Amino acid sequence: MPPESAALARPVSKPADRTAARARAVRNRTLLVQGCRLLVLAAVLGLWEWFARTGVIDPFNFSMPSRIWDQIWTWTAHGTAQGSLGAQIWATLYEALYGWAIGVAAGVLLGIALGRVRFLADVFGPYVKVLNAMPRIVLAPIFLIWFGLGPASKIASAVVLVFFPVFFNAFQGAREVDRNLVANARILGASDRRVTFQVVIPSATSWIFTSLHISFGFALIGAIVGEYIGATEGIGLLVANSQGTLNSAGVYAAMVILAVVALAAEGLLTLVEKRLFRWKPVQPGAER
Amino acid sequence: MTHDTSPAIELRGAGKAFRTPSGALHTAVRELDLTVERGEFVAVVGPTGCGKSTTLTLVSGLEEPTEGEVLVGGEPVRGIGRDVGFVFQQDAVFPWRTVLSNVMAGPRFRGAAKAEARERARDWLARVGLSAFEDRYPHQLSGGQRKRVALAATFVNDPSILLMDEPFSALDVQTRALMSDQLLELWAGTGSSVVFVTHDLEESIALADKVVVMTAGPATVKEVFTIDLPRPRKVEEVRLEPRFVEIYREIWSSLGEEVRITRERGAVHAA
């Protein structure tokens, strides 16, 4: 082949080659990352199992992955001492969701109200601070006394845990609305009510959503701790019973189940968020 | 509009002082006397940070004067008037609304039906050349396009008083000239009175019927110059005319001194 034609041919084939090579490199990197993730998991579980079997760590206290898996399997197949596993998950989820919904609604409502109305903020500000300074999880025993062993006491502890982060974010969001946007809306003819609903709330939404992610975790904690202290069903009760019978595998198994539930809820929330924030520019690196 | 002979905007000895966070009283503008006739395009120039923007907020009703009077259409300003449009220096389009929905906001806020608001918004989007972009969100537009959305969103309310606070200062030079021409075109059809605040003397001469020079802060009116350049103007062409250069020189001899005073103060602050 004469050298000129090779020189001519090169720039034509090059771009396509490069695109393909780049795509391949991206694919390879994804595979590598996921492979390494699996490897880390296998190593941790494998070491744990191996240490427990060889007696480096005490399997009675620390249990081991195979026993935890057996426990989950037993609960799934034959149910727990308190009833089927599904019923336990549902009981906890029901309390967490209920408490979360109430906490979020109250937090958003009061946060926006106090963020918009200076007078309310001045009057209630110190009280909110005092309540927030309290370790609210100690209220769980009180709620148990007030509302009994049923779901109400767990919902109440979930509500007090969820309310504050949501409230503070909604409050902050309402306070930090771009003053230009508010001025522009007022010039365009918006009433105070319109400014609240069409400017303040939309711009506070991204703040509120940030808090929704962490607050669902708090709702689960509230429900679990409530159940742990005293209940007739739920995953918290499973933990308490496993602890009572010195069944460490049972405690771990309950943890695994909780983690799966929490991750599923988080995924659902992210999905809703993506639909709601179509107007937002995608930040580079924000997508995982 | 009850008094048909009264000027569009009148400031009589108007002043505005703010309480700073440390408790001191900061005077932004003082003893402002200014008249804007109906259908007149007035540009206000002055050194940076002298309080030009405050003048606009007083006329718009966003702020109240602490001294003197501000009259719009012969009536003292109480709150935000329905006849006022305001184009801000920063982006003030709603990022969560599409382009069309942004332009519809004004009529909707003022109680127009959805269909009517949409029709009027589409009409103005066509005039600013953004019909093809009505479903986009602001972050998907360029700075110049966002400014055009802001112009459409303001003009769609048919304001008889148009206040503009350095609206094009964030744009690059070419986009700026284009936007200035577009503004003149849009304005020519409305007969509204404009107060256009800028620190760019060229821009002010190219656009306005009257250029008001403000003093270094606390600002007051120093001198008023009438611009007798014929309309319609094209901003990039008009600046090459000998009369333009003459006017420029004349106004700069007045404005330059205030700019120097401001700079010297800045130097003192920096030292």
Image (tube, coloured by chain):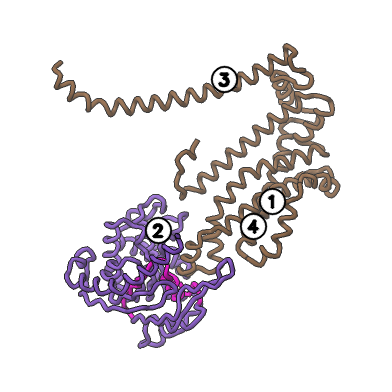
Task: Provide the letter of the chain coloured brown.
Answer: A
Residue identified by numbered label 3:
A39
Q: Chain of mark 2?
A: B
Q: Are marks 3 and 2 in contact (CB under 8 Å)?
A: no
Residue B4 on the magenta segment: no
Q: Label 3 sits on what residue type?
A: Leu
Label 3 Cα crowd, 10 Å radius (few <14 / some 14-19 / many 20+): few
Q: For this rendering, which residue is in front, A77 or A213?
A: A213
Q: Which residues are magenta?
A: B38-64
Task: Work out whether disc 2 and disc 1 sit on a shared chain.
Answer: no
Q: Residue furthest front?
A: B271
Q: Are marks 4 and 3 in contact (CB under 8 Å)?
A: no
Label 2 Cα crowd, 10 Å radius (few <14 / some 14-19 / many 20+): many
Residue A205 vs B16, above or below: the answer is above
Q: Secondary structure at mark 4?
A: helix
Tell us which disc is closer to us: 4 or 2: 4
Residue identified by numbered label 4:
A111
Q: CA distance from mark 2 to mark 1?
A: 37 Å
Q: Seen in the image, is B234 located left or right of residue B150? A: left
Q: Chain of mark 4?
A: A
User: Which residue is rendered at x = 37% and y = 64% of the image?
Assistant: B167
Q: Chain of mark 1?
A: A
Q: CA distance from mark 3 to mark 2?
A: 51 Å
Q: For this rendering, which residue is in front, B197 or A32?
A: B197
User: Which residue is rendered at x = 61% and y = 54% of the image?
Assistant: A170
User: Which residue is rendered at x = 61% and y = 52% of the image?
Assistant: A169
Task: Provide the letter of the chain coloured purple.
Answer: B
Task: Work out whether disc 4 and disc 3 sit on a shared chain.
Answer: yes
Q: Quadrant of the N terminus of chain B?
A: bottom left
Residue B14 vs A23, above or below: the answer is below
Residue identified by numbered label 2:
B100
Q: Label 2 sits on what residue type?
A: Leu
